[in-house]
C-alpha cells in the first residue's frame, strides 16, 4: 500500500509539472481532475465551498400599520381638517397612522391635492366639506422625516 501511494504521488508530481493536470483534492489516494464528476462530489464534501443559507429577517410587526375601516378613517380625517385647512401628506400620515396607499385612496374621496400655488403639495377638503373648516388659511405643521432636529440647539465652544 505504501509503495502504491509513493508511485501514485510520483505520477501526480510528473503530470503536474507538465501542466496537463490540475488537482483539486487528494482524497484517499485518488486523483480528482477539475470539471470531473468526482470533483463535483469533492466540492460538496468540502464545507469551505458550501455557502450557508442566509438567515431570514423576521418582519417587525410593531412598525406595521393596519387599515382601519373607511368610515373611521374619514371621521379622523375630518377632525384633522377641522383643526387645519391644509395638510401635507406626511403630517396626515403621522397623525392618523395609516398606510400611505390607503390614506391616499380615502383622501381622494373627500379632499383635493393642491398642486400649485401657496399651498402646493397639501391636501384640502372638497368644496362640499369646506363648512367643517374653522380657519380657511391654516396649514398643518409639516412632520420632519427624522428626529435629528435636536442637534440645532447645541452651542459649540472654541477650544484653544
Image (cartoon, helix red, strand yellow):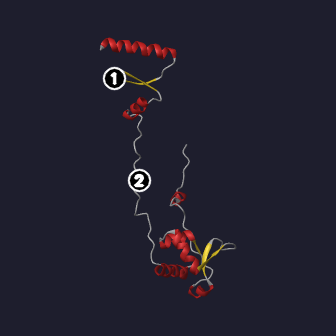
- Residue at 44% across / 70% down in the picture? 66
Expressed as whole percent of the image width and height from the top left, the position of residue 143 reads 54, 67
Answer above or below: position of 40 versus 55: above
User: Residue 96's x, y, as percent?
Assistant: 48, 73
Q: Which mark is residue 38?
A: none
Q: Is residue 38 left or right of residue 84?
A: left
Which x, y percent locates residue 98? 48, 71
Give the image quarter of residue 44.
top left
Question: Disc 2 designates what residue?
Answer: 57
Q: Residue at x 54, y 70 (%)?
A: 91
Q: Secondary structure at mark 1?
A: loop
Q: Nearer the viewer, residue 98 or 85?
A: 98
Mark 1 — residue? 28
Front residue (pair 80, 63): 63
Horizontally, is 124 left or right of 62 in the view?
Answer: right
Where is residue 64, by image quadrant? Answer: bottom left
Where residue 29 appears, as percent x and y from the top left, is: 35, 20
Q: Which numbered disc, 2 or 1, marks the residue that appears first in the sequence?
A: 1
Residue at coordinates 40% horizontally, 37% vertically from top-left?
50
Secondary element at tag 2: loop
Q: Quadrant of the C terminus?
A: top right
At horizontal 50% and vertical 80% (from top left) the residue drawn is 74
Give the CA distance from mark 2 to mark 1.
42 Å
Nearer to us: label 2 or label 1? 1
Amino acid at each position: 500500500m505504501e509503495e502504491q501511494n509513493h508511485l501514485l504521488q510520483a505520477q501526480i508530481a510528473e503530470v503536474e509539472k507538465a501542466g496537463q493536470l490540475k488537482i483539486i483534492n487528494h482524497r484517499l489516494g485518488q486523483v480528482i481532475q477539475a470539471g470531473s464528476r468526482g470533483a463535483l462530489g469533492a466540492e460538496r464534501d468540502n464545507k469551505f465551498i458550501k455557502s450557508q443559507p442566509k438567515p431570514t429577517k423576521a418582519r417587525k410587526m410593531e412598525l406595521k400599520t393596519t387599515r382601519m375601516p373607511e368610515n373611521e378613517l374619514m371621521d379622523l380625517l375630518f377632525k384633522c381638517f377641522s383643526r387645519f385647512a391644509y395638510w401635507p401628506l406626511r403630517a396626515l400620515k403621522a397623525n392618523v397612522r395609516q398606510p400611505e396607499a390607503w390614506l391616499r385612496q380615502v383622501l381622494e374621496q373627500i379632499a383635493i391635492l393642491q398642486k400649485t400655488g401657496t399651498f402646493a403639495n397639501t391636501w384640502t377638503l372638497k368644496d362640499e366639506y369646506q363648512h367643517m373648516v374653522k380657519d380657511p388659511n391654516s396649514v398643518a405643521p409639516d412632520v420632519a422625516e427624522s428626529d435629528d432636529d435636536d442637534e440645532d440647539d447645541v452651542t459649540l465652544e472654541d477650544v484653544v
